[in-house]
Image (cartoon, rainbow, N blue to C red):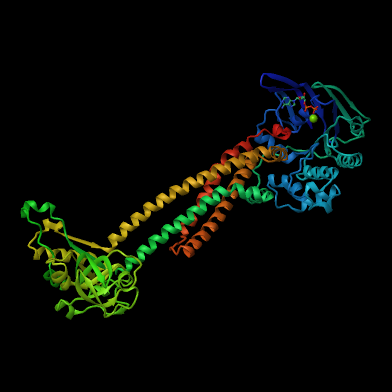
Amino acid sequence: MLELKHINKTYTNGKISFQALKDINLTIRQGEFVAIMGASGSGKSTLLHILGFLDNPENGEYIFLNKNVARMNTQQLCHIRRHMAGFVFQQFHLLPGINALDNVNVPLIYAGRSKNKQLGLARLASVGLAERADHNPNEMSGGERQRVAIARALINDPVILFADEPTGNLDTKSEEEVLQIIKDLNRQGMTIVMVTHEKEIAGQAERIITMRDGCIISDTSRAQTARTEAAQELAFVEQKHAGAEIFDHLRQAWRSITANKLRTLLSMLGILIGVAAVITMLAIGKGATRSIEANLSNLGSNLLMIRQGSNRNSSISLGTAAYSRLTLANLNELSAVKNIARVSGQVTGRAQVAKDSANWNTTVYGVLPAYAPMHNSQPVSGRFFGRQEIQERQRVAVIGSTIVEKLFANQNPIGQTMKINKQNFTVIGVLPTKGFAMGSGGDDSVIIPLTTAMYRTMGKKYLDMIEAEIDAPENIAAAKTAIKEKLLRTQSLTEADEAAIDIRDMSEIQDAIKATSSTMSILLGSVAAIALLVGGIGIMNIMLVSVTERTREIGVRKAIGASQRDIMAQFLIEAVVLTSCGGLLGIALGWVASFVIARVLSWETYVSLSSILLSAGFSIAVGLLFGLMPARQAANLNTIEALRYE
Ligand code: ADP
Ligand code: MG
């Protein structure tokens, strides 16, 4: 069945090298029960590792089922281990934290046969542990653990069983039980190679090979029980594409993550806080943008603001003279332009307002009655001024809530008299509260008839601005052109003086705000990236520690059939599950924080779907990126060294 020819093995540690196996020649036939005996350090384990496809010999040949496996790469060896060999170790090497049945089923997963769950129970029953299926290794005696390990070794129907001092850690009774199971297996036709240093145990085997200092010094067989050689012809299982499935990896990752909850929580803290910060900051940023936008739409939509342009490039055509300014006459002309629903002129000035001993410096706007509907500024109490007040240049005022507070101590001001730049005005209305102080119609403003402002209060002959409301958004562009043409013509200007008229609409202002908010997003995004980077480094650190800590587990997994890819996937998925959980908790925390901020500080916050998707995506990416290095380190561990790791 297998044949070793001139096998040598030398261990090299730095400058010291030690030849553990010296020119070993050995043939083992199918169905044999071979015991390898010898003092500690004589090379028994080294030989068994080579026999068991865990290690390559330095030179020589190893023919197994007519294939030379001496020079096979790790991937090919892994395949043979997975499908043809079973292992039992002195230290049992069960995986901690999962029950007996799951332990028995681990090799099934690596062989891509995870669907076959019944098999595990059957194998456990065959070693007399059916009723212990849901016990964890630490709830079982040494003998029971070793029997579970034997069941695990048998799960993929190996053709040969390797056992390295299987009874070395057992009491006499368990030792007998385990030996009985092994002997029964042999009787059923299983080829067995068992290492031991005890004579009595070796005595149970039919053939005893004794080693000393890396050499075989004797090879004795007891009276052969008549055996028909190769009752069934064994074939070498060719390599096929099989491996653990993603779902199995996910389940394993979940198990190992939940095995130590506190530590898991601590290690994902970086990601958690990072993501929570991102969600909260974006929620505040988005909330701020939204409230600004709401205020803007409060100003009235479809609004054009027409100002006299700069006259800098006018020196050629008009000498030093500035463009003629916007006048009341222009206002009347514009109201005739197509698509313009309403127009209002505006003059602005700072003014001292007073009532009795109360004083306040504010902004006064002179406007037309059309201003109120254009700006959604119909007074909440009292009324707006009308045509008559304009014509008669009456001293009436509509005031914002700040003025009510400062001059009238929040008492009803309607009908009261107040002073604007020492002139008496009658308050006829109070503006709706807009939530912002500045700007026309803001809470800190006084609105008076345009004519009163121009001719009585401010002494202005020209308008600072004309506002025009367009009937529909789709007509804005056309109206802009029409207005420009009209104003240029009345001011005797040509197309070349295009800059003479400056027309803005709300969409421009909104664009400006959007640009600002996207700058803010980039800023917050970089803060997020740094937070997640720090979180990711934390995860990498934890994963590296975890790989070191679980070196033996990795060795065991490889010995029972895990490929490099399986180990890599396991740790990578573990890292991703870790960061994803951290990310999810972070999103939840960020959401709660945004809610609390909105409640406590009464800021507007808004958790957007895009910020959630962004955070989730980032968490997964961080897991992949920072899990890669630890996962590769785990995958590249040498199986034997990992198994021997203390
Ligand atoms: P046994 O199983 O018979 O006790 P081993 O096969 O484990 O012996 O080891 C044989 C010899 O090889 C011992 O002297 C041991 O110190 C040495 N050896 C085993 N593994 C290594 C290693 N990785 N590096 C260096 N020396 C090793
Ligand atoms: Mg040993």
Q: Position of residue 438 (x, y in %)?
A: 30, 63
Count numbered badges in the picture. Answer: 0
Q: In what quadrant of the picture does the N terminus appear?
A: top right
Q: Position of residue 276 (x, y in %)?
A: 52, 54
- Residue 93 is drawn in which quadrant? top right
- Residue drawn at (50%, 44%), measured in percent from left and top? 533
For residue 470, above or below residue 320: below
Determine whether, in the image, residue 159 is placed left or right of residue 633.
right
Q: Position of residue 327 (x, y in %)?
A: 12, 67
**Ligand 1 position by quadrant:** top right
Q: Position of residue 225 (x, y in %)?
A: 92, 34
Residue furthest to the front: 357
- Residue 188 is drawn in which quadrant? top right
- Residue 86 is drawn in which quadrant? top right
For residue 541, above or below residue 447: above
Determine whether, in the image, residue 436 is placed left or right of residue 631.
left
For residue 594, above or below residue 212: below
* Residue 368 appearing in the image: no
* Residue 263 appearing in the image: yes
